[in-house]
Image (cartoon, rainbow, N blue to C red):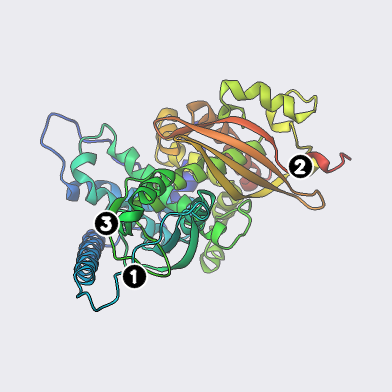
Amino acid sequence: MVAMAEPVATGVEAPTFEGFFHQHHEPLLRVLYLATGDRHEAEDLAQEAFVRMLERWDRVRGLDDPRGYLCRTALNLRRSRLRRLAVAARRLVGRPAFAPDPAEAAGSRDEVRRALAALPDGQREALVLCEWLEMTDAETAAVLGISAGAVRVRLTRARANMRRELRGE
Amino acid sequence: MMGEFREHLDEEARRVSARSAALEDVKRRAGRRRIRRQVATGVLALVIAAGSFLLAVTAFRGPGSARPAVGPAPSVSPAARVRLLDGANDPEAIDIIRELINKAGYQVLQEGPAGHAYETTTIACPPAFDDEAARMAHQLDVDAAIVPAIPHPDYDLTLYVGEDLALFEHERVLTWIGRFVEARRNGDAERFLAPSAREDYFETSGRTEPRFGELYLYPEQEIVGYLVPNWYKVETDTWAFDLRLVLKSPCPSGFERITIAAVGDGRYELTSASLAGAPVSDCPAT
């Protein structure tokens, strides 16, 4: 089972942060790993996202979709870091930010990593959230801050690119 | 097909797994942040208290001693001299804040690290500069605390940049611009335009192509990056930006001026655009 568990049903007892953490930590870690290609960055981003959740837990626990809030926080943190690095260094931001660990990429299963790395950030995020985390278009749109139509466009392009990379179509 | 690459992704994702001590790590990190904030708040309170005490002592010195210095009166240009202390440790935000301050008619004379991360932006100044401090807070669109400080010969106001100023609105706006540029690169930027901006944008192009994403750019003029060298606050929720689009060599890069407005729920729309410098359409089509 890889998908993040659905939000706890309301009307029962209020979820604890510890319970929320155990439910969503590993799936978030893997989402971030797929999105960044770097396990250390994924761990750091996941930890920071949960720290922010913990600091706002009184408010966050009452949200309809705390899982979406968690994903949004983590992906926004990643974008912020990329942007700060880019602006501070006055470097261009058009290049792919996905940077697979060379040692890991040398393994036998690196086709998927290469294919993911070839995707633009937006397409990769849409693909991971929809396909791997099994979010709906609307949930993904809320996390990425775009419309559901834009999610479908990204998804279509991401799948076409993945097919081309993986199967040589 | 839904889930077409699910197995591939699943296989890749299983390369990482959570460590058993992850929850403790999160709690420790949250604790460290809390302590840092408490210490920072305490230190700031001490600094302010010490400043107030010195001000009181200076004001009540005997008649034989020198008169206490009176804070310089606000002048037309610059409105005040500013010491900018970075408590947020965010170079990008500090660059933007410095620029905003300068554009508002202030002069940043000193700049450096504050030594602590402040949660709330604070402006310390002698009473004569309270109005300027309030104006600066308004210009920066932040609910800053304005605290008394003794007059200083080198500067009038000290701005302690807090996390509220450094990482909130500016960050969201820059995120929006990044998305806009990326969407434009993919020919999908029309959804970022306010209805009122669509015609304007078409009109300024001088081109006949029907779709937004193709207005300025032929295929060989691919956008490879962007910079935001200037931005101006037009109204409370509206900002203008000089957006420098960096095009694939050998096309010359060029500036546009775009204006965006907040439309609620953290969303923005591009409300107008015009060429602000060398047009990006200078690259001849092949």
Number of other residues with Cα within 10 Å of mark 1, as a class: few under 14, some 14 to 19, many 20 or more: few
**Would you name the residue on which mark 1 appears?**
B115
Q: Amino acid at mark 2?
A: Val
**Would you name the residue on which mark 2 appears?**
B280
State which tag comes first along the sequence, 2 or 3: 3
Q: Amino acid at mark 3?
A: Val
Q: Is residue B86 visible?
A: yes
Instruction: Please identify, in this view, whether the residue under mark 1 or under mark 3 is nearer the observer.
Output: 3
Query: Residue B229: x, y in percent?
Result: 61, 51
A169, B56: nearer the viewer: B56
Q: Quadrant of residue B206?
A: top right
Q: Looking at this rendering, what residue extends furthest in the right direction? A: B286
Where is the N terminus of chain A found, in terms of image quarters?
top left
Q: Amino acid at mark 1?
A: Gly
**Would you name the residue on which mark 3 appears?**
B147
Mark 2 and mark 3, same subunit? yes
